[in-house]
Amino acid sequence: MNPPLTMHRAQGAATTMPPTLPQPLRLLETSPTPPASADVVVIGGGIIGVFTAYYLAKRGLSVALIEKGRIGAEQSSRNWGWCRQQNRDARELPMATRSLELWDQFAADSGEDTGFKRCGLLYLSDDEAQIAGWAKWREFAITAGVTTHMLSGSEASERGRATGRAWKGGVFSPSDGTADPAKAAPAVAAALIKLGGTVHQNCAARGIEMEGGRLSGVVTEAGTIKTRAAVLAGGAWASSFCNQLDVRFPLATIRQSIVRVAPLAQQLPAALAGPNVAVTRRPDGHYVLAISGRGRADPTPQLLRFAPQFIPMFAKRWRNVFPGGLEGMRWGHETRARWKLDAPTPMERARILNPTPDPAGVRETHRRAIKLLPALREARIANTWAGYIDSTPDGVPGIGELPQVPGLILAAGFSGHGFGIGPGAGHLIADIVSGATPIFDPKPFDPARFNASAWGKVADF
Ligand SMILES: Cc1cc2nc3c(=O)[nH]c(=O)nc-3n(C[C@H](O)[C@H](O)[C@H](O)COP(=O)(O)OP(=O)(O)OC[C@H]3O[C@@H](n4cnc5c(N)ncnc54)[C@H](O)[C@@H]3O)c2cc1C
C-alpha cells in the first residue's frame, strides 16, 4: 500500500523515502552523538518534545533533544493536523486556546513553516442530541472567550454544500485550524537548532542516573548526558520507560488508521467532521480521511496490566475501539520487560513505530468519506497508515515532575489530541522545568492522579 515517496532534506534536496514513513516528512541532518552535559535533556522528538525544547532554549538554557528515530516520525506526522478548541474537554481548553496564539507566534518568531492556518473547523450533523451538545459546549466556551458559531439547518447545508445534501445543523469554529503534520515537528526542531539547542536522531534514551536522590544524567545508546532535569515526551513508549524506573503510568496505545487520497480538481472543505467520518485537506492538496476515536486495542502485557483502569474509557467508546491482534507485541513499545542500560533496548529495534493499518477500518473510512463527500469517489487512494495513540484512562495527558524521580518531568498520554496543543503543552512544560509562572494551571494534568485512581470524567476525543 505504501508506494515510494519523496522526503525533503533540510537543505531542500529530495531523496527516496524509506517505506516506513507514510508521507513526505522533512528530514533534518543531525548528529547521533549527544553532548556530555546539558541544562535539560528532552527525550522524544514528537510535537511535545520539540516545543518543550524550543521554549527552554528561548530562555537561554542549554537543551539536548534525544530522538530514537526521526523527528516527528511517530504520532506527530501521522495525525489529521487539527488544532482545535471546538469540543475540547474543559481541562484542556486553556491549553488549546493559548496554543492557537503560540502557533502563530512561533511562525512569526522563527520564520519556520509549520503549515498552521486558521481555516476554521466545520461539524455537520442530523442528530439533534449532538447538536444540543454542541450548543451546551458553546455556552461554556463563550465564558472562556472562545468564538464558535452554531449553524442552523440552512447555514449548515450552505457551508457543507460540497456534501450535496441538507443538514439539520452544525457548528463552525473560525479561529481553529490545522497545521501540517509533515512539516510541523521538524520545523520546530530546526528553530531549536537556530537557538543553539542540539538535536540527536537515531539516539535512544535507555534510562537515567540518580545522585543524591535526584536525576543526575540521561543514559543514551551513545553515552550519558549529565543533567539535573529531563523531560520524558516519549509518546507511546512513555509507560514502558516509566516501568524501568518503577513508576506506574497507565497508558493504552490505540491503533488508529488513516486513508490519504490524491488531490481533486474540485476543492472540498479544509476540515470537515461529518456524523461518523472526518476529512482534512493537506497543504499539498491531498485529503486525509479518518474516523474519530475508532481504533484497535492490541493486547499486550501493558494493556492487561492497566485494563481495570481503562474500563470506563472502553465502556464509553465500545462502538469504536475494537480488539486488535499481535501487532502491539511485535513492536515492543508496551513491553513489561526490564531492559539493560548497556545493551540495545526495544526502542533501538523499533526506531519508528509504524503499525499496520486495520484493513476493515480503512475500507469503512473510505466508504463513509465517499458517502459524506461524493466527489471523493474520483480521488485515487494514495496510501494508508496507522499510528499508536497514547491514551490515559481519563483522556487527558500526564504532565508534571514525578515525585519518585525528582528532576524527571513526565509529558505524555496526549490521548489523540496532543498535536494541536503541542505549543501550549511545550510552553507549560518549559515553565515547570525552569520554575517560571505556569502559562496556565497545570493541576488537571498532574501525574499523581494516576496513583490514586483515574476513574474520573473520561474526555471526548
Ligand atoms: C491517526 C491519528 C490522528 C490524530 N489526529 C490528531 C489531530 O487531528 N489533532 C491533534 O491535536 N492530535 C491528533 N492526534 C494525536 C497527536 O498526533 C498526538 O497526541 C501527538 O502527536 C503526541 O505528540 P508526542 O510528541 O507526545 O508523541 P509522538 O509524536 O509519538 O512522539 C514521541 C517521540 O518520542 C520518541 N521516543 C520515545 N521514547 C524514546 C526514548 N526513550 N528515547 C528517544 N526517543 C524516544 C519516539 O520515537 C517519538 O518520535 C492523532 C494521532 C493519531 C495517531
Image (cartoon, rainbow, N blue to C red):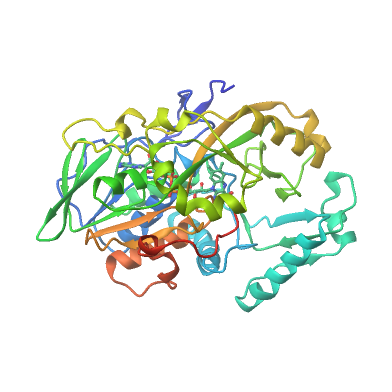
- The spot of residue 127 in percent (x, y) is 81, 57
Q: Work out whether 282 lies above or below 419.
A: above
Q: Quadrant of the N terminus?
A: top right
Residue 268 figure quarter: top right
Q: Can you name the residue that lies furthest to the front here?
A: 308
Q: Quadrant of the C terminus?
A: bottom right
State the residue in front, 83 or 441. 441
State the residue in front, 131 or 381. 131
- Asked if residue 310 lies left or right of residue 250, the reply is right
- Asked if residue 227 lies left or right of residue 104, the reply is left
Residue at 45% from the left image edge and 29% from the top image edge: 13
Residue at 60% from the left image edge and 75% from the top image edge: 144
- Asked if residue 2 lies left or right of residue 16, the reply is right
- The spot of residue 419 in percent (x, y) is 51, 51
- The spot of residue 446 in percent (x, y) is 38, 65
- The spot of residue 120 in percent (x, y) is 69, 57
Residue at 48% from the left image edge and 55% from the top image edge: 393
Q: Work out whether 83 lies above or below 12.
A: below
Q: How many marks?
A: 0
State the residue in front, 461 or 304. 304
Q: Can you name the residue that lies furthest to the bottom here?
A: 143
Q: Work out whether 2 lies above or below 178.
A: above
